[in-house]
């Protein structure tokens, strides 16, 4: 278990990183970006990933925008090198506090201290908390490539099993969460604390007083990529009382019925469906209790 | 198959307040460089994929898996290993607490737990026993059943903040 | 992590305190040395561990910490298919990889096979050979095919990747049922039925009659998943040929250094004198390192061939897939009971899936033979029939793992007790009470004589603790309120911990472990070095053996240094496994210490010019004249004479201060015992099982070091819980293992393992030198059954009975939702 050999290149700013990616690719190399490396390195150690060159964004931590967490115009922007733990310990506006609360589910402290928000999104694991949160809060990924910057909305980001719309020659610069959700929660189930979730669920409720007027339901672990569940969101859109158990049950049932989860001997589709029902219901109840004062 | 050049890099690593110059392949992990190039063998390697935590060190004060960092990435950072804890032959309060509570048996996971605990206590000095338990779930121990490790870290937290465990 | 944060208000408040003592048990105060005869001053006290300072400061030395000048690194090309004829193995590309120094296949090294044999007739046992490197046939994914040696471990991996292997693939054999089915692929030609051992050890009179007359018959099939003992330090070795000493030095993490030496010498075809095995600090073993592996032999051969030191460190993927696994067993158990709940007969069919090869020295028979010999457990069983089989499959081979079949047969019989209780409408603890052995010594239907223990007392105390804490009421409240599913489970068991040569010989092994030896030396300053053939790997021998020596000689343990794990220092030892170290190794150490004490007294009497009967050890590092306590000789003065002024010694006393002793446990050995009680809660939303309370009442005789014993209990319980709820290696139809990383092999963490309260009962063993019984394995033995019983209790209202571990949350949820 040792990574295959690669050449190593430090990028000193975003343009430098894009230039390195472009030049290395042109030279026939298969370059890849490393930031926190907490997902990439295990894959390299098992030689499941074997880039011939790594472009290290580490020096870009000195670029303030890359590690900045800032709110402007009702959106929350995270620099690409913001770590999970930086979000966990940040004081965020109520509309985005769910981001900080969700971080306790991301691995363990040593992973959270190095892993980055952008890295997690580009990795595109179907159960990754950031992937669910991106769909929940309408994230926009800002990526810079040889042709300049472009914005990728979350609903165009995930292309299936560990595949995203970010191109190999692009560098994510920042992630902008555009939809505040003060009444939101993410919860998940794994057999062991800190593991990748079997299923995870994120819910955002639109509330008018105690009345639900709509919302988002996002699931991980039930499809090759994280998904919104329109059938469950339709139940929320039909409205109801936020404290109504029947409404919660209806949303959870709608979600569990709508999905077509993977089936394997250890974790059957039936079990994933039941977890979905439980987790969506829990997330609804927790979301209704937020923001806590 | 092709054999890429090994692309040696000359690095200066700051480990336990000392500067070390090493020439390494970029694929060499920080754990391997600490252990085999710098001969700081207190940091152990248990899985090489970031789950067991035996290789936990502090990088700029934060606990990190030394198997999930290439040594080239650690240039310019302040790395601390288990060898930094005892001063002048005296065990630190945390090390002493591990001994007092029998928080180690074979001792293989111990350096990782010590460094994890140092990182956690530095950031959460007010951590409760349950907070500590959750934080320590980052690392694996096969001998103790964890209870005495939690006890030792909790006792250290309490004594550092001047309260009783 | 549960997603339903259930309110804690219905959990009895006092149970929230993990430090709550269990009433009635013997509570040790770690700070109070005791002075009562056998124990003396140090035994019984939780003295600071001698091992700790180096391990806490990163100054321990584990195998991978060793670096020798000119050292090369090795790794293995391993099979990627489960069962195949090897049609081609081409290492030419490997040898061309930069950094690769050499690559060897089986023909290159020409090593002798590893063969473990039982002295049993052909219809009972089929010997098979384990080649060091596979020659023509591959029998599991991960089997070593070739050794690659390179300048660093990274280049080794590159070289392994470059090897070209072709196979003629055969059908995989991935279950015991599959192995025994007609037309199954044959793993070893010598065993065309895939059965390596088939022994019907007991068929006593009256079994069929008892079933015919039974008021209640219970039938249960229990299964336990394939587990990995999982020492956190993987296996490894550094081998170097020393031309000056004409000797191969192999530094390796093994529980059995002498057995490694024996097999190495035989496999390499060299005199055993030319092999020295030493063991540095060791990061756990749990049985996985008590067998001789193929890899250390290949590495030693390469070092000899290349005349360079060679290091091999198993990586985690290898450790999970290609190391020794354990535990996969199925028990079909029938039990007859009378109307009063007394068991009248037991009829058991045990099938153990031992994987691809027999392990050395124990053979593939170890698990079914252990189960067959000891299955009646702590109960009075009047009639007994058992058949035990070891089958071979195309999975990684197995080694004895902490508990060795006892977690499994205890689970089987404890499920029998629970089911009988339901059938008879009795409390499950009451059924146990009516059957448990209470008169000692007791000779069972299995011919085994059990020395005194506290079977009934431990059961009573565990139950009383759970009752007094209010868990029975909490369980009923949960049931009445609906929505909370609490369950209470027990497990009462004993464990033979002093297997002497006589007991092992009954298994008909041709290599019979049992005795152990010790040599003690005092130097000119009065300090002591003592050796043992046992091998610490976390059990604190340096501390506990020093306590034993200190008490016998009356000196501070600080002056005692234990040396172990060096075949040059110890003529022959059997290492550490089967909870034998303190019972057997500790007894040898005690006896050697006593002999040294006698020698010191003889010399002192001569120097004091008095009769030998008129002196005694003074308990403070010296010898005192009894009729005039003002006359005293410190050890250092005696030692000075013994070494440096030997002309002053008595004429019939040899110079220097050494003594040796061996110890072997007579007869059937000694039995530790315990009862575990556990309270669980099953989450109706996720099926997750949460452990709310864990109580262990144990009796391992005289407790040498309370903290160490409790550490062994807790650690063992954690591994037992791991087996009950989390860990399993499964194989797909092609024989590919499911768990190649810690993502898939679920080792529980601090958030999954509960705090455990421990109470000690103390029944001193009559025939070990210190009164101690073994304490290493009990935790692991009791936990799976206790947890499984508790989960079944939580599911009682569903009518579902679970008899398989690990318990998957999906299975629990099926039961709770009535869809199983």
Image (tube, coloured by chain):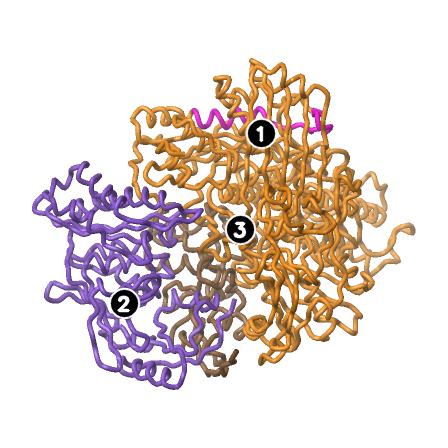
Chain colours: A purple, B brown, C orange
* Contact check, label 2 and label 3, Cβ < 8 Å: no
Q: Secondary structure at mark 3?
A: loop
User: Where is residue C38 shown, x and y percent of the image?
Assistant: 68, 36
Could you tell me if residue C527 is visible in this image?
Answer: no
Is C451 a magenta residue?
A: yes
* Residue, disc 2: A82
Distance CA(mark 1)–CA(mark 3): 31 Å
Q: Which residues are magenta?
A: C442-467
User: Mark 3 falls within which chain?
Assistant: C
- Secondary structure at badge 1 equals helix
- Horizontal side of A229 relative to C208 (left or right) equals left
Q: Nearer the viewer, residue C67 or C433?
A: C433
Q: Nearer the viewer, residue A232 or C579?
A: A232
Helix, strand or loop status at disc 2:
loop
* Parent chain of label 1: C
Out of C734 and C559, give the one closest to the viewer.
C734
Q: Is residue A39 visible?
A: yes
Give the mark toward the camera: 2 or 1: 1
Q: Is residue B64 left or right of residue A241?
A: right
Q: Are marks 2 and 3 on the same chain?
A: no
Between C312 and B105, the one lying in front of the other is: C312
Residues tagged by mark 2 and mark 1 found on one chain of the structure: no
The residue labelled by disc 1 is: C413
**Quick check: C336 left or right of B126?**
right
> What's the distance in space between the residues labelled 2 and 3, CA to CA?
44 Å
Q: Earlier in the sequence, mark 1 or mark 3?
A: 1
In the image, residue C673 lies in the stretch drawn in magenta: no
Q: Is residue C206 above or below residue C367?
A: above
In this picture, residue C608 sits left or right of residue A272: right
**In the rendered image, the vertical position of residue C158 relative to residue C378, given as above or below:** below
Question: Counting other residues with Cα less than 10 Å from the Cα at mark 1, is it few (<14), some (14-19), or many (20 or more)?
Answer: many
């Amino acid at each position: 278990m040792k990574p295959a050999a690669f050449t190593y290149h430090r990028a000193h700013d975003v343009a430098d990183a894009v230039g390195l990616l472009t030049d290395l690719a042109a030279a026939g190399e298969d370059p890849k970006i490393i930031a926190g490396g907490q997902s990439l390195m295990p894959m390299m150690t098992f030689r499941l990933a074997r880039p011939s060159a790594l472009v290290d964004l580490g020096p870009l931590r000195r670029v303030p925008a890359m590690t900045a967490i800032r709110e402007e115009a009702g959106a929350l922007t995270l620099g690409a090198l913001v770590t999970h733990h930086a979000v966990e310990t940040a004081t965020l506006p109520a509309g985005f506090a769910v981001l900080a609360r969700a971080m306790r589910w991301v691995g363990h402290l040593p992973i959270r201290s190095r892993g980055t928000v952008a890295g997690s999104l580009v990795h595109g694991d179907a159960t990754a908390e950031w992937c669910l949160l991106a769909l929940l809060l309408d994230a926009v990924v800002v990526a810079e490539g040889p042709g300049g910057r472009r914005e990728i909305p979350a609903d165009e980001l995930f292309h299936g099993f560990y595949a995203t719309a970010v191109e190999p020659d692009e560098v994510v610069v920042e992630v902008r969460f555009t939809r505040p959700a003060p009444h939101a929660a993410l919860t998940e189930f794994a057999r062991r604390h800190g593991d990748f979730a079997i299923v995870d669920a994120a819910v955002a409720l639109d509330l008018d007083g105690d009345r639900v007027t709509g919302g988002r339901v996002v699931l991980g672990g039930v499809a090759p990529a994280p998904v919104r569940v329109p059938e469950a969101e339709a139940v929320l859109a039909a409205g109801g009382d936020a404290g109504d158990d029947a409404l919660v049950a209806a949303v959870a049932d709608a979600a569990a019925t709508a999905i077509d989860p993977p089936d394997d001997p250890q974790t059957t589709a039936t079990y994933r469906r039941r977890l979905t029902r439980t987790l969506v219901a829990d997330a609804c109840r927790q979301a209704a209790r937020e923001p806590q004062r | 198959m092709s054999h890429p050049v090994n692309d040696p890099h000359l690095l200066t690593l700051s480990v336990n307040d000392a500067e070390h110059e090493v020439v390494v392949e970029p694929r060499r992990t920080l754990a391997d460089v600490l252990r085999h190039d710098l001969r700081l063998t207190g940091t152990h390697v248990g899985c090489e994929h970031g789950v067991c935590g035996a290789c936990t060190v502090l990088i700029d004060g934060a606990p990190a898996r030394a198997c999930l960092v290439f040594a080239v990435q650690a240039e310019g950072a302040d790395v601390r290993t288990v060898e930094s804890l005892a001063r002048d032959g005296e065990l630190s309060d945390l090390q002493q607490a591990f001994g007092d509570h029998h928080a180690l048996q074979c001792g293989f996971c111990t350096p990782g737990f010590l460094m994890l605990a140092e990182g956690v206590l530095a950031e959460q000095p007010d951590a409760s026993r349950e907070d500590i338990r959750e934080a320590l779930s980052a690392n694996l121990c096969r001998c103790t059943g964890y209870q005495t490790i939690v006890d030792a870290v909790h006792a250290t937290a309490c004594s550092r903040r001047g309260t009783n465990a | 992590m549960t997603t339903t944060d259930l309110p804690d208000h219905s959990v009895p408040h006092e149970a929230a305190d993990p430090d709550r003592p269990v009433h009635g048990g013997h509570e040790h105060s770690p700070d109070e040395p005791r002075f009562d005869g056998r124990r003396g001053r140090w035994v019984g006290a939780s003295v600071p561990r001698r091992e700790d300072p180096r391990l806490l400061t990163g100054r321990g030395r584990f195998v991978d910490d060793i670096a020798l000048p000119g050292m090369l690194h090795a790794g293995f090309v391993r099979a990627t298919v489960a069962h195949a004829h090897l049609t081609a193995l081409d290492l030419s590309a490997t040898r061309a990889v930069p950094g690769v120094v050499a690559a060897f296949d089986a023909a290159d090294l020409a090593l002798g096979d590893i063969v473990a044999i039982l002295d049993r007739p052909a219809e009972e046992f089929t010997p098979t050979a384990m080649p060091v490197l596979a020659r023509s046939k591959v029998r599991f994914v991960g089997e070593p095919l070739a050794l690659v040696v390179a300048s660093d471990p990274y280049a080794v991996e590159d070289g392994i990747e470059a090897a070209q292997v072709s196979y003629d693939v055969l059908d995989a054999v991935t279950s015991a049922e599959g192995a025994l089915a007609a037309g199954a692929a044959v793993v070893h030609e010598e065993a065309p039925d895939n059965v390596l051992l088939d022994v019907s050890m007991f068929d006593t009179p009256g079994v069929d009659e008892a079933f015919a007359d039974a008021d209640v018959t219970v039938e249960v099939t229990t299964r336990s998943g394939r587990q990995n003992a999982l020492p956190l330090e993987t296996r490894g070795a550094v081998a170097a040929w020393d031309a000056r000493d004409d000797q191969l030095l192999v530094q390796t993490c093994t529980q059995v250094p002498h057995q490694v030496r024996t097999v190495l010498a035989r496999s390499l075809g060299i005199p055993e004198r030319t092999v020295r095995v030493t063991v540095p600090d060791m990061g756990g073993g749990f049985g996985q390192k008590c067998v001789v592996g193929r890899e250390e032999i290949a590495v030693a051969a390469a070092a000899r061939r290349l005349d360079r030191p060679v290091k091999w460190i198993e990586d985690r993927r290898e450790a999970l897939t290609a190391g020794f696994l354990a535990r996969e067993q199925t028990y079909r158990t029938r039990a007859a009971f009378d109307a009063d709940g007394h068991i009248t007969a037991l009829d058991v069919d045990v099938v153990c899936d031992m994987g691809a090869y027999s392990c050395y020295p124990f053979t593939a028979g170890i698990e079914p033979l252990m189960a067959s010999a000891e299955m009646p457990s702590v109960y009075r069983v009047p009639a007994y029939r058992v058949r035990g089989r070891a089958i071979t499959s195309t999975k990684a081979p197995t080694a004895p793992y902490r508990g060795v079949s006892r977690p499994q047969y205890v689970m089987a019989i404890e499920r029998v007790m629970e089911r009988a209780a339901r059938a008879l409408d009795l409390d499950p603890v009451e059924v146990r009470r009516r059957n448990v052995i209470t008169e000692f010594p007791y000779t069972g239907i299995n011919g085994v004589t059990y020395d005194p223990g506290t079977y009934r007392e431990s059961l009573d105390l565990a139950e009383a603790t759970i009752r007094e804490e209010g868990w029975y009421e909490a369980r009923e409240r949960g049931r009445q309120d609906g929505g909370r599913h609490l369950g209470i489970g027990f497990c009462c068991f004993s464990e033979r911990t002093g297997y002497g040569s006589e007991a092992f010989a009954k298994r008909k092994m041709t290599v019979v472990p049992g005795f152990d030896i010790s040599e003690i030396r005092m130097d000119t300053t009065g300090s002591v070095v003592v050796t043992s053939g046992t091998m610490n790997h976390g059990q604190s021998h340096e501390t506990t053996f020093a306590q034993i020596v200190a008490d016998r000689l009356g000196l501070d343990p600080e002056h005692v240094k234990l040396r172990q794990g060096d075949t040059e220092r110890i003529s022959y030892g059997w290492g550490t496994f089967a909870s034998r170290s303190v019972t057997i190794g500790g007894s040898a150490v005690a006896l050697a210490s006593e002999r040294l004490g006698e020698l010191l007294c003889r010399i002192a009497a001569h120097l004091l010019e008095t009769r030998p009967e008129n002196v005694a050890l003074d308990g403070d590092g010296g010898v005192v004249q009894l009729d005039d306590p003002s006359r005293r000789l410190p050890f250092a003065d005696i030692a000075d004479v013994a070494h440096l002024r030997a002309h002053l010694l008595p004429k019939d006393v040899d110079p220097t201060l050494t003594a040796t002793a061996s110890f072997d446990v007579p007869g059937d050995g000694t039995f530790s015992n315990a009862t575990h009680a556990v309270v669980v809660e099953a989450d109706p939303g996720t099926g997750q099982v949460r452990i709310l309370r864990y109580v262990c009442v144990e009796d391992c005789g005289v407790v040498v070091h309370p903290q160490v014993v409790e550490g062994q209990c807790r650690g063992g319980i954690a591994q037992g819980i791991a087996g009950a709820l989390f860990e399993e290696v499964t194989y797909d139809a092609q024989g590919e293992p499911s768990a190649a990383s810690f993502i898939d092999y679920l080792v529980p963490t601090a958030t999954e393992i509960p705090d455990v309260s421990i109470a000690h009962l103390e029944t001193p063993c009559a025939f070990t030198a210190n009164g101690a019984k073994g304490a290493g394995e009990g935790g692991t033995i009791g936990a799976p059954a206790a947890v499984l019983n508790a989960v079944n209790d939580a599911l009682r209202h569903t009518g579902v009975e679970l008899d398989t571990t690990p318990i998957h949350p999906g299975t629990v949820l099926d039961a709770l939702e009535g869809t199983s």
